[in-house]
Each structure stands twice: as structure tokens, then as C-alpha cells.
Amino acid sequence: MKKVSLKDIATAAGVSTALVSYVLTNKEKEARIGEEMAKKIREIARQLNYQPNHIARSLKSGRSFTIGLVMADISNAFFANIARTIEDEAKRNNYTVIFGSSDENVDKSQDLINVLLNRQVDGLIITPTEGSEKQIAWLQEQHVPFVLIDRFFPGINANHIAVNNFESAYQAVTHLVKAGRKRIGMIAYETTLHHIAERKRGYLEAMRDHRVPDAEKRLKTARYSHLKTDIRTAIDQLCTGPDRADAIFFATNSLAIEGLKYINELRIRVPDILAIIAFDEGEAFDLFYSPVTYIQQPILQMGKEAVRVLLEQIKDQQKTVENIFIDTTLVVRQSCGSKR
């Protein structure tokens, strides 16, 4: 079967090959091509089953038109949704995404970066793992275009897209205080990563500012590799005795989901006995008998900004580093009902 060319599409549309090229590389606005004509050309290309010649395009431009994406845990809905957004946005800019999951493992993260660079990707979008500072510094030394998303290292001046974790956590704890909760606990991952440290700091400062006692004592941690057992231990410590917690703030959705399983097993009623707020959303929160209040991260905006910043850096590696912080939204639902 003869391969469909730009000339074939141009003949069918009654326009020049150059005009077709502009449309199929999403540059119709630059060439001042009308929406109707652009739509017509794309429809003809679809009908003729046009497949662009990426090899020829790469040889001409010196680029592979691929982006490498390293996610921390693709099984987590938050990271899966970010990956989908990045893939859609990259496609809109005529890029293909190759991605993998580091599973919060620094060695696997390095292996993925090596594989992606060997595939000659034009740049990387990375959710860095704990202890991966040397990997990020090496990418800078090698002048590899990259953007960090969701997490970053304060000591490394690199492009990053994140939310204001401190303010988000502070707002969540303040909401619990205003709802009448007086013994508020927090469960976070045991990690040195900056975004979790900022969520802890937001919790501690909100507790201090609202004069809620025992914040340090009620701040519990769980290891990523021992999530189930550590969550159970933390909840046992928080939810037993005469001074038991009347609210828990979970630092991530994965912590919250595992925690809710155990809370349900213990038959602790939410929100009558225990209020719940989680950082990040999850489909499981909708299925819980008391829909969970959560901090919603702007996934669509984060993904789009990551692609934009990376593509601009690919075009101009001397471009100024961008540190972008995006606001979150506290979605209030039944799980943190007022005690007043």
C-alpha cells in the first residue's frame, strides 16, 4: 500500500503542501490559516490514514520529538492522572511520551533515566525519589532539558512545578479546628522529601497558631515499604486511650486509603468519632460511606505547565529557570463534619 504523503492531502484539499504541513504540525495560527480549512485538512488526513514520517522529521530537526517521563508510582491515581495529562499535552505539541515508574526507588529511577536518555528523548519530566539529588545534579551537568513535577530539592536550582504544600496543610488543619476538633493527629510518610516536610510544617504551625496541644506527639509516620503495618500502628497510637484523636490529617491519598481500611475495620465512625482530611483525591474517597474531604491538586494545570516549560527549555537551554507554585483547593465533604 502506497504511503500517504503531504502532497496527497494537499491535492485532496486543493491547497499547497506547505499549508498542509503547517496544519499538521499545529502551526496554522502562525500561518494565519482559518479554522475551517485547518479542520478540513485534518479530516482529509484522517480519512487517508496519514502517518507522519518521524524519522525524516528527526533527521531534519535534530530532535526525536519524544519526552521521557519518570513517575514516582504509576499505580497511584494522582501520578497516573498527571501522566495522562502530560501525554495529552505532549501529543497536542506533536511529541510522544515514553514513561516508567520508579516505585519510589532511587536505583530504579536512575535506571529509567539511563534507558530514556539512550532512547534519545529530547527532555525529561521527573517526579524525583528520595535520595535522587545526584541524579538531578548530573542531568544539569550534562545539559539535559528536564522539569521536576510535584517535588523538588530546595538546594538545586532547577525547573519545577509544585503546589504550596505548607499553605495547603495549614488550611486543612485550620478547617478541622474551626469544625470543633481539638485532638488532631497527622500521618505522613517517613521521608526527607521536601513536599512531605512542608506538609508536616503546615500541620505543626497550624496546631501551634490555634493553640492545639500535643502536635509533635500526634504526628506519626509510616514507611513506604511497610505501609500497611505502619499505618495500623499509627492509628492504634492515635485512636486509643482517654486522649484519643478526634481527627486525622493524612499527608497523601495512599496513606488515607490504607488508613480508612483500618479505621473501618476498627468500626470507628467517621465523622462522629473521627474526622478525616486527605492530601490529594482518590476515587475510593467517593465510595466511602462518609465522602472524604481532601486537598485537590490542580493536576491538569501542573501537567500542562510541565510540558510547556520543558518544550521551551528544549528550544532554548539558556532559558531562565522557572519555579512554579500552583494553588490547591480544599474540597469539603462529610468526613470532617462539625462537632459544634
Image (spheres, grey):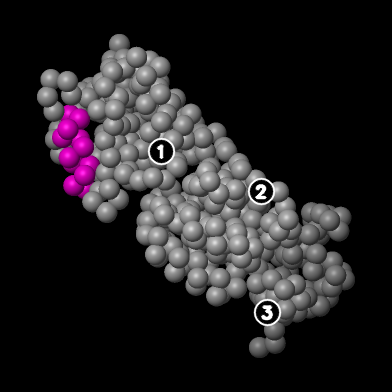
| Three-letter code for the amino acid on which mark 1 is drawn | Ala
Name the mark nearer the viewer: 3 or 2.
2
How busy is the neighbourhood of tag 3: few (under 14 within 10 Å), some, or many (20 plus)?
few
Left or right placement of residue 113 versus residue 54 in this view: left
Q: Are marks 1 and 2 in contact (CB under 8 Å)?
A: no
Who comes first in sequence, dot 3 or dot 2? 3
| Three-letter code for the amino acid on which mark 2 is drawn | Val
Label 1's element?
helix
How many numbered marks are there?
A: 3
Of residue 248 and residue 19, the one placed in the foreground of this image is: 248
Label 2's element?
loop
Tell me the residue that label 2 is attached to. Answer: 321
Please tell me whether residue 270 belongs to the stretch shown in magenta: no
Q: Dividing the picture into quarters, in which one does residue 200 lie?
A: top left
Q: Which residues are magenta?
A: 228-239
Tell me the residue that label 3 is attached to. Answer: 55
Image quarter (top left, top right, bottom left or bottom right) of the C terminus: top left
Q: Is residue 89 visible?
A: no
Who comes first in sequence, dot 1 or dot 3? 3
